[in-house]
Image: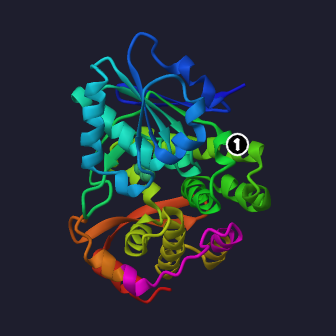
Amino acid sequence: MFQKIEISTGQSLSQIYFGFDWHRVTELLPSDTKVVIVTDNNLKLIYGDEFPDYPVLSVNPGETSKNLATISRLTEQLLKLGVDRKGFILGIGGGVVCDLAGFLASVYMRGIRFGFISTSLLSQVDASIGGKNGVNSRSAKNIIGLFNQPEFVICDISMLATLPEDEYLSGLTELLKAALIRDKQLVDKIDANYRSVLSRDSDLLNDLIIQSVQIKKRVVQEDERESGERKILNFGHTFGHAAESEYLIKHGIAVAWGMVAAMELANRNGYLHDADRKYVTQIIHKLGLLQGADIRGRDVAKKISSDKKRSGDSIDFVFLTGPGKCMLEKVSITDLVKFIRTFN
Ligand code: GLY
């Protein structure tokens, strides 16, 4: 038996499937139109023989493919295949492939239908859910993009068994983040079962992914276009994004460090009790989410100061106020830089 979560925003409905064998994807695809698969070369190598019988467009794995040059190349390939406005794009991959495939489908002929098979933990709990699609410019991540919900996302945990450890931990950070901003019981559950989480116990993992997607669903339905509440999904990301682009490290490691730093700031400002800060920080350590992180606050401070993507002198910063609770408050960039410069 599979489970389904529906995300309904404005005119669109996005169906997220759990416990659904990805090989059954054809049941969700239109039969009367051209379907094209977009994936990366690694996934094509691992799963290509099991893909349904549609043309496959493949990109190099990793963030370096997430740009307009790739979109332009894929567009020419779609035209060559004769894909028209009734066409359908099936993205099979993690965050990069889903961002690319969703963006391509949204702009090709002013928008065609699309859905995902989400292959990494990070994309199952975050990147493929919620309708953010886009590519990077030369100097800024995800700066060219739009909101558009996929028709469906298949989250099949059997695909997570072969994920490299650092990729898995990177996804766990986003799963924990979802719990931290909205659900204390889920935080406690992750803490109490951390060994099984690390050994990728499939029943537990499926349950945790479903619960974290429920949290994201509620936030996205409240504020799809991130004009307010959706910003809470950025907990740990202000410092984390800066660390990620400074050191070119895994997203999750950088965000885990960003969460620890953000909690320290919340504690200093009197928003987060020390016992809560310690409790959450020890979960982050127990899960090994900071593995290999050698991040210096002063480097992150420099990166934040020179961030071209930022607009204005202050941002809505996410402060954790307890496990499962958070609030947004405007903080000046000057104050953030002053704080992070001395944080290690
Ligand atoms: N990854 C954050 C969001 O979807 O808003």
State the image coordinates of residue 40 (x, y, percent, origin top left).
Answer: 46, 44
Residue 223 falls in image quadrant: top left
Instruction: Give the residue furthest to the bottom.
Output: 342
Residue 289 sits inside the magenta stretch: yes
Up-down relation of residue 104 to residue 240 (above or below): above
Q: Is residue 82 left or right of residue 287?
A: left
* Residue 329 x %, y %: 37, 66
Residue at (56, 60) in percent of width and height? 170
Name the side, left or right, on which 297 lies relative to 134.
right
Q: Is residue 306 magenta?
A: no
Q: Position of residue 174 (x, y in %)?
A: 55, 56
Q: Assess mark 1: CB under 8 A from ligand 1? A: no
Q: Nearer the viewer, residue 38 or 264?
A: 38
Decide which of 164, 12 is in the foreground and name it.
164
Is residue 215 visible in the rendered image? The answer is no
Residue 312 in the image: state x and y as whole percent.
Answer: 20, 67
- Residue 165, quarter of the rendered image: bottom right
Q: Residue at x 43, y 64 (%)?
A: 237
Question: Relative to 141, is 342 above or below?
Answer: below
Depth check: 331 or 116 in front? Answer: 116
Whether residue 121 is visible, yes or no, is: yes
Looking at this rendering, what residue extends furthest in the top direction?
A: 32
In the rendered image, the quadrant that contains the N terminus is top right
Residue at 50%, 61% (x, y): give it. Answer: 326
Q: Residues within 10 Å of mark 1 (few under 14, many from 20)?
A: few
Q: How many marks?
A: 1
Part of the protein shown in magenta: 280-300
The amino acid at mark 1 is Asp
Residue bearing mark 1? 207
**Element class at badge 1:** helix
